Amino acid sequence: MNTISCQVHTITPLTDTVFQVLLKPEQSVEFAAGQYLNFVMSDDDKRPFSIASSPNCELIELQIGAFAADSWAMQVIDHIKANDTVTIEMPGGNAQLRVASSRPIILLAGGTGFSYIKSILTDLVNRNAKQPVFVYWGLREPSACYHLEQTQALVDKLSQGKFIPVVETADDTWQGRVGRVHEPLLHDLMGLESYDIYMAGRFDMVGFLRNEFIEKGALTEHMYADAFAFI
């Protein structure tokens, strides 16, 4: 990984527990859509986050879910708020978009795992991808949702794109799908053997879904997630 100093451009709350961070690197950076960076708190404390921006963006975007006052993630948010310049290491990971593949694509995320699939989705749009792309994003409840309109606008730029947000617990205002994120997917797509599948979220969720999808015909060599290196 390369060590890069970045100016803090903006930090914006997207929900009560999710922050969008935009960083301006002080040198040119190269990475592939779907890779991650390490946020350097100290020489002995480096914390990984998926990159939400695509490789051609001027700014590096992170989407950080921070749920408690002194949590691992909130410490990073507090560090960003307290400093005009921060240090990152990048790129990392091997679950990046396979640009040579023309297979139909499933992008699936839980919560702020959306960062990972947003990078890939944006790159697919920039590449004018022609294959079918299905984007499934699972969240706990409608109040946890953000960037739904922006994501739909991105998907609409694809010739064969479909965006399916899913909440586990709905209220009277929710007009979308309800359940665990993989349930609508398995209802919509009967066989998974022809798909490239990119996943991000809690490690236990990703491990569970890998097994579920293999049972539905998905091929291990065509499923991608950084979590696979740790489970």
Image (cartoon, helix red, strand yellow):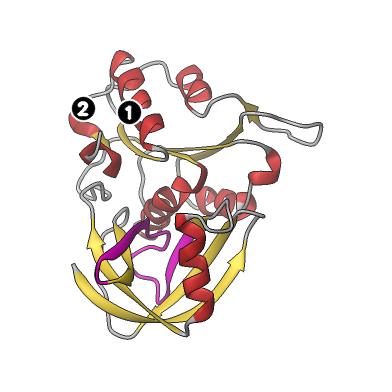
Do residues under tags 1 and 2 come within 8 Å of each other at their CB atoms?
A: no
Residue under the point 40% across and 77% down:
58
* Residue 146: image location, x then y, percent: 62, 51
| Residue 225 makes an appearance in the image | no
Label 2 CA crowd tier, 10 Å (few <14, some 14–19, many 20+): some
Decide if residue 80 is on the left or right side of residue 204. right
Q: Position of residue 10 (x, y in %)?
A: 55, 76
The one of 107 and 144 positioned closer to us in this rendering:
144
> Above or below — where is 196 with respect to 87?
above
Mark 2 residue type: Thr
Write down the residue under mark 2: 220
Side of 142 relative to 193 (left or right) = right
User: Quick check: 13 left or right of 196?
Assistant: right
Q: Which type of secondary structure does the marked residue at label 1 adopt?
A: helix
Residue at the far right in the pictured view: 172
Secondary element under disc 2, as helix, strand or loop, is helix
Q: Which residues are magenta?
A: 43-63
